[in-house]
Structures are given as structure tokens and as C-alpha cells.
């Protein structure tokens, strides 16, 4: 199992691992993530003709994009449990909500990526105009929900910092993770604005002008969130570098 191999690697980011065994909740999570990946391909039958093969391959890009998102969530969950080793009721409840959200939104995510990657296809529209707002609403709800749960998990770990005996860098990294996940939540919420754009009328010149200004405001919001994310990444990289460059004693402690 992939977790077994990863468990034999010492962390290199200065954050001590408090769990070195696969817990029951992690084993259950692995099964759910595996099932979610299965849902991505279970509808794909073995093609019988070259036409069917080419039609099947059209969905490959959507599968890759969704698979990358799922593995990113799995990796984030793996890192959380390795770092904090929490198995209390709050952690279990939040993790179960996370797994439910992943399973519920895996098909909508694959569909959305499929639309994005094949939007210039020839044939009937994949998404009816009156359904566009609902597609963006579903994506916004799923995306923001997943990272809200991660933010709550890290907030719970931060509240347990004394019991977990987090050192200076680990406290910073936990607070930074809360900020990072919260910022990603706002990225997801911004897609509610995109859904709103789909509901605005665009018949008269005034309505078109309003739509244009609203579109510019939405783009500016995404740009601001992106710049903020870049700043957070740079700050984390700087602090981690400073921590790892300290005398050998803290570094040894970080890898115990």
C-alpha cells in the first residue's frame, strides 16, 4: 500500500510526525478514495470500434484532471494524520464529512472538467444555457466544502497544540495551513460569483455593460486571491528555510 511506503520516509519539512501507523480511519479513507477513483472510470466500457475508442479518449483529460484533484486531497489528508496523529471524535467526524463530500462531488467535478476540455466540440451543447449557473454552483459548493473541512481540521489541531506539544515552527505551519485552506475556500466561493454572472440579463446595452463590469470585478477578485496565495507560499518557504537552517538540535528534534 502507498501509505506503507510513505510511512518509512522521514519528513523533510521540519514538521515532526506523531503517527507512524495506519489507523482504522485512514484505512477506511483509503477505501473511500479508491472507490471515488473507481467511480471516475466505472462507466467506461471497453470500446469495440475505433470510433468508440476515440469517443472514450475524449474523456481522458477530464479523468486526469479529476484524478489529480483526488490524489491532492488524499495527500493532504495523509499529511494531516502523519503530523498530528489525532483520532478523537471531532477529527473522525470531520474526516467522515470530507469523505462524503469527495464521493458526492466526484461526478460533477469530472463532468465540469469534461466540459472545460471539450467546449469547442462539434455537436449539441454539453451544458444547456439555463444549466450553466447550476454547474458553477455545484462546483463552488463542492470545492469550498472540501477545503472548509481541511481548514476546520487544522483549526482543531491548532486548538490541541499544547497537548500535541507543537514547537515554534509547527505552530506557524498549522496557522499557515489554516490561512492557506481558508484562502482556497474563498477561491471556491468566488465561483458563486461566476454563477451569478450566468443569471444576469444581457439583452439591452445597459445590461451588457453591467455584465462587463461584473465580469471584470470577478476577474480582479480571482487575481487578488491568486496574489495572496503566492505571498503565503513565499512566506512559508522563507520560514521553513530559516527553521531548517537553525543549529542541529532543533533539526534533530524535528525528525524524531
Image: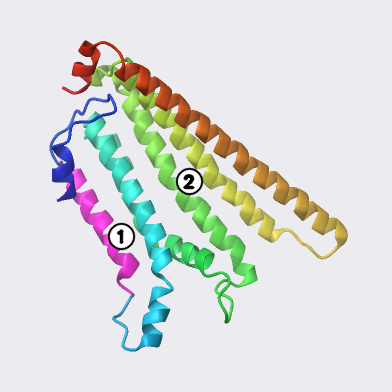
Badge 1 element: helix
Give, as a single range, the part of the protein colored magenta: 23-43
Where, by quadrant of the figure, is residue 153 drawn?
top left
Identify the residue at the far right of this view.
Answer: 205
Q: Which residue is mark 2?
A: 144
Q: Is residue 81 above or below residue 165?
A: below
Residue 97, visible in the rendered structure: no
Image x and y of residue 191, in percent: 58, 50
Give whichever of 49, 184 is nearer the camera. Answer: 49
Q: Is residue 203 above or below residue 171?
A: below
Q: Is residue 79 above or below residue 48?
A: above
Residue 205 among magenta residues: no
Image x and y of residue 124, in percent: 58, 81
The residue depicted at 27 percent of the width and 24 percent of the height is 14
Badge 2 element: helix
Classified by dominant secondary structure, the portion drawn in magenta counts as: helix
The residue depicted at 19 percent of the width and 23 percent of the height is 255
The residue depicted at 34 percent of the width and 66 percent of the height is 40
Number of callouts:
2
Q: Which residue is mark 1?
A: 36
Amino acid at each position: 500500500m502507498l501509505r506503507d511506503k510513505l510511512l518509512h520516509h522521514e519528513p523533510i519539512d521540519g514538521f515532526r510526525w506523531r503517527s507512524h501507523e495506519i489507523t482504522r480511519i485512514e484505512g477506511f479513507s483509503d477505501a473511500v478514495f479508491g472507490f471515488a477513483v473507481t467511480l471516475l472510470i466505472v462507466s467506461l466500457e471497453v470500446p469495440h470500434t475505433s470510433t468508440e475508442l476515440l469517443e472514450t479518449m475524449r474523456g481522458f483529460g477530464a479523468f486526469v484532471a479529476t484524478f489529480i484533484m483526488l490524489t491532492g486531497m488524499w495527500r493532504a489528508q495523509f499529511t494531516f494524520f502523519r503530523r498530528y496523529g489525532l483520532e478523537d471524535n471531532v477529527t473522525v467526524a470531520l474526516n467522515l464529512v470530507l469523505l462524503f463530500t469527495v464521493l458526492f462531488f466526484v461526478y460533477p467535478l469530472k463532468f465540469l472538467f469534461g466540459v472545460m476540455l471539450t467546449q469547442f466540440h462539434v455537436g449539441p451543447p454539453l451544458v444547456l444555457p439555463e444549466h450553466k449557473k447550476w454547474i458553477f454552483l455545484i462546483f463552488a459548493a463542492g470545492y469550498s466544502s472540501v477545503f472548509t473541512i481541511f481548514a476546520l481540521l487544522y483549526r482543531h489541531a491548532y486548538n490541541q497544540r499544547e497537548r500535541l506539544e507543537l514547537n515554534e515552527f509547527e505552530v506557524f505551519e498549522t496557522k499557515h495551513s489554516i490561512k492557506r485552506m481558508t484562502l482556497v475556500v474563498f477561491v471556491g466561493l468566488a465561483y458563486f460569483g461566476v454563477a451569478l454572472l450566468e443569471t444576469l440579463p444581457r439583452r439591452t446595452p445597459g445590461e451588457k455593460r453591467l455584465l462587463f463590469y461584473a465580469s471584470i470585478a470577478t476577474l480582479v477578485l480571482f487575481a487578488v486571491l491568486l496574489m495572496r496565495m503566492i505571498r503565503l507560499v513565499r512566506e512559508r518557504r522563507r520560514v521553513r528555510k530559516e527553521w531548517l537552517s537553525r543549529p542541529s538540535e532543533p533539526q534533530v528534534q524535528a525528525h524524531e
